[in-house]
Image (cartoon, helix red, strand yellow):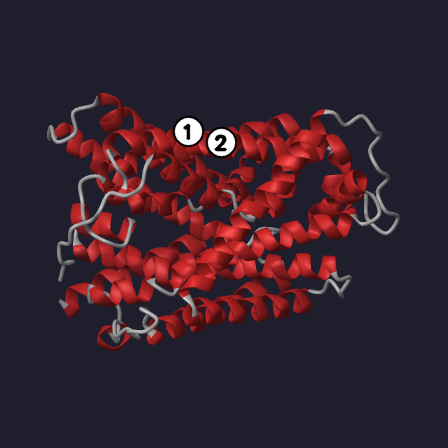
Amino acid sequence: MGDKKIEIKQHYGLLTALSMIVGICVGSGIFFKSDDILAYTGGDALLGVLVFCIGALCVIFGSITLTELASRTEKTGGVVGYFEDFISPAAASAFGWFQVWVYFPTITVVVAWVAGIYTTMLFDLPSTLETQVGIGLIYLTFLFGMNYVSLKAGGRFQNLTTFIKLIPLIGIGLVGLFWSAPNPEIPNEVAVIGTSSVGLGWLAALAPMAFSFEGWVISTTITPEVKNAKRNMPIALTIGPLIVLVVYLAYFLGTVSIVGEEYILSTGDAAISQIGTAILGANGESIMLTFVLIAVLGVVNGLTLGYIRLPQALATKNMIPMSDRIKVMDAKRELSPASTIFAFVVSLVWMGLHYISQKTSLLSGGDISEIAIVFSYLAYAVLYLKVIQLKREGVIKNVFLGYVAPVLGTLGSLVILVGGIFSNPTFVPFFLIFSLLVCIAGFVYYQKKN
């Protein structure tokens, strides 16, 4: 049950490919994960820099490796298409199930919840988990509806927020370079958390780091549409993550310079409010939080935009239940109503599970999306090994692309796995097993159905 071959026009140049990678990677993670990274390093900013550099290397070698597969297939669905063409359709169904049931919904609901957090901060609302999740659900419902009703509205909103979210990141980095004022005092009602030695505990920072860089793999889906893809995509996938790294380091070091390590460790996500006040004065907090909220909503919108199409894509390959119904599209909107409803309902379920995990402190300060991302890197490693096999078979000629990049990409996946285990040693193994069982269910379903 493969895709029909269609003629794909190559209308994107190197600049477009580069901007897409940067736009996807620079998302909400840097705003609400940088304090987590600093916490796991015990307030050691240099260790935090090392963590961001490791993340960039994992992305660079992983993305270059997947480009070798992307340039050799016309299958749709991004990574699902790579599994379908180079491993097996059943393996593609397995990974597709993980994406549709676990990966996309967990990331989407967590970022929607973060939008709720920044909304309570911006409008001085009660910062209870219930309020944050409730506002997150409102955003989620609105964006699912908007992206179904109007393709243009969703696309325009995405373009606008992509530009806006770079302003505070670059601005804080530039200000931090010349900042000389003393660090602000920590509010009396906030418990002071000082710097400390964490030993190997800093490896736990690799889990929130992976979230900060997440989204890069989506950029590989445009490879067939890029002019001279074999030359331009490896260049874009090397330079793109480096640009993201520079932006992230500028923001990270800028925040440390302006408010100090102890303030960030003690106040967490709220540090951005103080940074806004310090830079822009009395209204600075509101201005900065507005920028951040728009940026986070842009990420929710982008995830929603992609997620509502995923069940439809799997249904066209006969990979999920009720495929005959889910793949039926509304001709006017060019979307499947059933696919949109499917994605929305699964997201609601995961929002409930996320609420429980946060309410019970099940994840020791982390969240459900981090573990899903860790598992996705393990799945990418299967494709990295396939590239090595293609090199051994002589299909890939270049030693760097056939051996060096996939080996380093695989090592990067293992490093992120170790980081995930360090961050939540009790829960991570359970969640990884759960994700594996979802994949097995998808594999078995396809075998029986087809």
Total marks in image:
2
**Residue 206: x %, y % from top left:** 51, 38
Residue name at image x 39 percent, y 49 percent: 375
**Most distant residue in the top direction:** 399
**Residue 353: x %, y % from top left:** 52, 66
**Residue 112: x %, y % from top left:** 56, 61
Residue name at image x 83 percent, y 43 percent: 281
**Residue 63: x %, y % from top left:** 34, 36
The residue type indicated by label 1 comes to Ile
Q: CA distance from mark 1 to mark 2?
A: 6 Å
Residue 177 left/right relative to 86: right
| Residue 200, picture quadrant | top right
Contact? badges 1 and 2 (CB < 8 Å): yes
Residue wearing tag 1: 239
Residue 409 circle label: none
Residue 378 left/right relative to 252: left
Q: What SS does tag 2 mark?
A: helix
Q: Quadrant of the C terminus?
A: bottom left
Using the image as rendered, state which of residue 320 and residue 121 is in the foreground.
121
Q: Quadrant of the N terminus?
A: bottom left
Give above or below for 51 relative to 87: above
Residue 243 circle label: 2
Query: Label 2 neighbourhood size at 10 Å, few (<14), some (14-19), many (20+)?
Result: some
Asked whether the viewer can see residue 197, the reply is no
Q: What SS does tag 1 mark?
A: helix
Residue name at image x 29 percent, y 50 percent: 78
| Residue 139, picture quadrant | bottom right
Residue name at image x 36 percent, y 57 percent: 99
| Residue 131, picture quadrant | bottom right
The residue type indicated by label 2 comes to Ile
